[in-house]
Amino acid sequence: MNIERLKMLQEQVIKAAPSFNMMEWARPWGYMQAEWPETLVTNEPPPCGIQACLAGETLIMLNIAKVEKCNMIPADDRWDGAQSTIPYLAAEELGLSIEQKQRLFYLSKHGHGNGQYYWPVNFELEYNAAKTPLDRAQVAVRRIQHFIDTNGNE
């Protein structure tokens, strides 16, 4: 587990607060909101036109991906551009095991969480109750800190 990169991710999430959304790996703003309107905490699209979760923000932070014309595209040959590979590559870059990847990147079993581990329920509830993108980002920062403090076990 690369603690230095996890701390960098905390800074990245706050910096990217307007586009932070744990229900999206990295997609144009509004992509999921037609199906799940509750994932939208603001009617204002982020400046970059894209939204991303912790895994997507990891790739952006490490310059593995870049945002261009409202899309996240590969910035180097480490990422093939497929949505399905984002969490695996991000986990590799953060030095996470499979279980740790699920604990950090899957908000709950009701979203993208197709594994058996998720955020602790208190963080999930706090995230879902957040009223602004910055509030959500701040919850994620606290969640990352808890993850570091428990050595990735929670």
Image (spheres, helix red, strand yellow):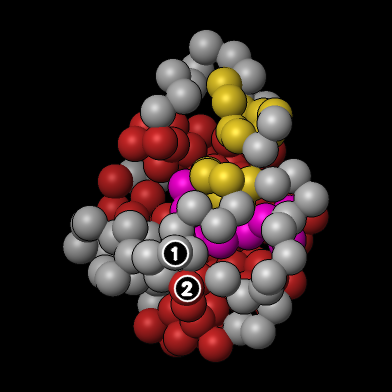
Crowd tier of the residue under label 2, counting other residues whose Cα lies within 10 Å: few below 14, some 14–19, many 20 or above: few
Report the amino acid beneath label 1: Ala
Local secondary structure at mark 2? helix
Report the amino acid beneath label 2: Pro
Residue in front for this viewpoint, 4 or 123: 123
- Residue occupying the point 52% across, 44% down: 26
Q: Is residue 58 above or below residue 151?
A: above
The span shown in magenta is 16-25
Q: Is residue 139 left or right of residue 25?
A: right
- Residue occupying the point 43% across, 32% down: 89
Measured as percent of width and height from the top left, residue 129 is found at 54, 87
- Residue occupying the point 50% across, 17% down: 78
Measured as percent of width and height from the top left, residue 27 is found at 52, 44
Crowd tier of the residue under label 1, counting other residues whose Cα lies within 10 Å: few below 14, some 14–19, many 20 or above: few
Is residue 24 covered in magenta? yes
Label 2 to label 1: alpha-carbon separation: 6 Å
Instruction: Please say whether residue 138 is visible from this viewpoint.
Output: no
- Residue occupying the point 34% across, 36% down: 84
Q: What kind of secondary structure does the magenta stretch mostly adopt?
A: loop
Residue in front for this viewpoint, 149 or 19: 19
Which label belongs to residue 81?
Answer: none
User: Do the residues under discs 2 and 1 have CB atoms within 8 angstroms?
Assistant: yes
What residue does disc 2 label? Answer: 37
Which label belongs to residue 34?
Answer: 1
Quadrant of the snapshot with the C terminus: bottom left
